[in-house]
Amino acid sequence: MEEKDKEEKVTGENLEPEDKNLEQEDKEEVVGPQEEQQIDEAKNWEEEYNKLLDEHNRLKNQYLRLYADFDNYRKRTQREKEELLKYEGMEFLKKLLPVLDNFERALKEKDTDPQKVIEGVELTHRQLLEILNQHEVKAIEAQGQPFNPELHEALMVEVREDLEENTVIEELVKGYFYKDKVLRPALVKVSKKQ
């Protein structure tokens, strides 16, 4: 019996390597051409995914930089706009200062020579009109014109048979345009038929 046991052992030992060979063959069969193709495709997909992820991260960083640049630009232009609005009248006011100087000179002469005061006021008036003209401020023509509520404000009405109704008889206070807008309407006296 011992020999039989030995034979069985030997036979059993011999079977183990055969089983191992069978397992390896099974493994080789499992990884066939179709499976290799799937593995290659999976590797390709993984590589493609990594490339896309890198591209995504690059674009995201680029977007964040552009967003920050734009935000800085927006803040800078807002500050510049606020500063511009804050000091927008500065140049105009600089041009008015000589007018003020001329008024002061004329007032100094009031006790010595009234004619010099009149000349100074006339000069100052011309200077002021010139500055207003440079800034596109123009007088509204009212005298003798038909009353226009967009350009004129009627303060008085006078019965006049010799004029058409609603004709401006007298300009009490001049009105002005600034470019194409009414800066101030003219205050006028208007005719009325009885």
Image (tube, rainbow, N blue to C red):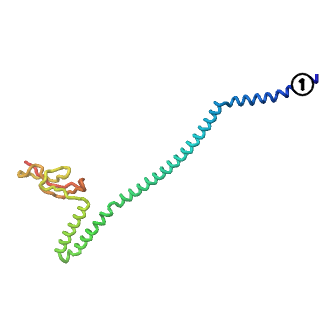
Pinpoint residue 4: horizontal percent, then vertical percent. 91, 22
Helix, strand or loop at disc 1?
helix
Crowd rating for badge 1 (residues with CA inside 10 Å; few <14, some 14–19, many 20+): few
Would you say 139 lies left or right of 19 here? left
- Count the numbered circles shown: 1
Quadrant of res 36: top right
Viewer-proximal residue, 31 or 72? 31
Establish if 125 lies above or below 166.
below
Pinpoint residue 152: horizontal percent, then vertical percent. 18, 52
The structure residue drawn at horizontal position 21% and vertical position 54%, both measured from the top left corner, is 185
Report which residue position mark 1 lands on.
7
Quadrant of res 137: bottom left
Establish if 14 lies above or below 111.
above
Viewer-proximal residue, 185 or 87? 87
Pinpoint residue 73: horizontal percent, then vertical percent. 44, 54
The structure residue drawn at horizontal position 16% and vertical position 58%, both measured from the top left corner, is 172
Pinpoint residue 158: horizontal percent, then vertical percent. 10, 53
Would you say 158 lies left or right of 100 here? left
The structure residue drawn at horizontal position 36% and vertical position 59%, both measured from the top left corner, is 84
